[in-house]
Amino acid sequence: LCSMWLARQALPALPSHRLAAVRDELGLHHDKAHAALDDVMVVVEALPHLLPRVPAVRHYVPLTAPAATVPTVVTVNRR
């Protein structure tokens, strides 16, 4: 799951979809940008705010055949 893609889908009017901008928009309180633990905590805390705003989450799953170079797309519909 790409947090930037999800933020673009859930918060389209936000001028920037960088993690710090999403954090500020949602009022989350982790201030150490690019510190691995803080970045993970922002994503974990942002997910419950972002996922309900997106009707379907699409992610790419690589094909298992060794010669395949184009990934397949799997869509998970949220109900």
Image (tube, rainbow, N blue to C red):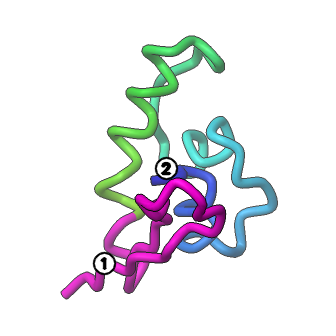
Q: Where is residue 5 drawn, in percent x and y?
A: 60, 61
Q: Is residue 12 left or right of residue 68?
A: right
Mark 1, other Cα within 10 Å: few <14 / some 14–19 / many ≥20? few
Residue furthest to the left: 79
Q: Quadrant of residue 64?
A: bottom left
Judging depth in this view, the residue of 26 and 37 nearest the camera is 37
The answer to whether the residues at label 2 and label 1 have Cβ atoms under 8 Å apart is no
Q: Which mark's residue is nearer the viewer, 2 or 1?
A: 1
Above or below, 36 relative to 28: above
Q: Where is residue 36 drawn, in percent x and y?
A: 51, 15
Q: Quadrant of residue 49?
A: bottom left
Above or below, 3 relative to 34: below
Above or below, 3 relative to 24: below
Q: Where is residue 67 drawn, in percent x and y?
A: 59, 60
Judging depth in this view, the residue of 24 and 18 nearest the camera is 18
Q: Where is residue 60 drawn, in percent x and y?
A: 49, 65
Where is the C terminus found, in terms of image quarters? Answer: bottom left
Q: Which label sits on residue 76?
A: 1
* Disc 2 to disc 1, C-alpha distance: 24 Å
Q: Secondary structure at mark 1?
A: strand
Q: Residue at x 45, y 74 (%)?
A: 58
Q: Which residue position is annotated with label 2?
A: 26
Above or below, 70 relative to 36: below
The amino acid beneath tag 1 is Val
Judging depth in this view, the residue of 75 and 62 nearest the camera is 62
Mark 2, other Cα within 10 Å: few <14 / some 14–19 / many ≥20? some
Question: Magenta stretch?
Answer: 51-79
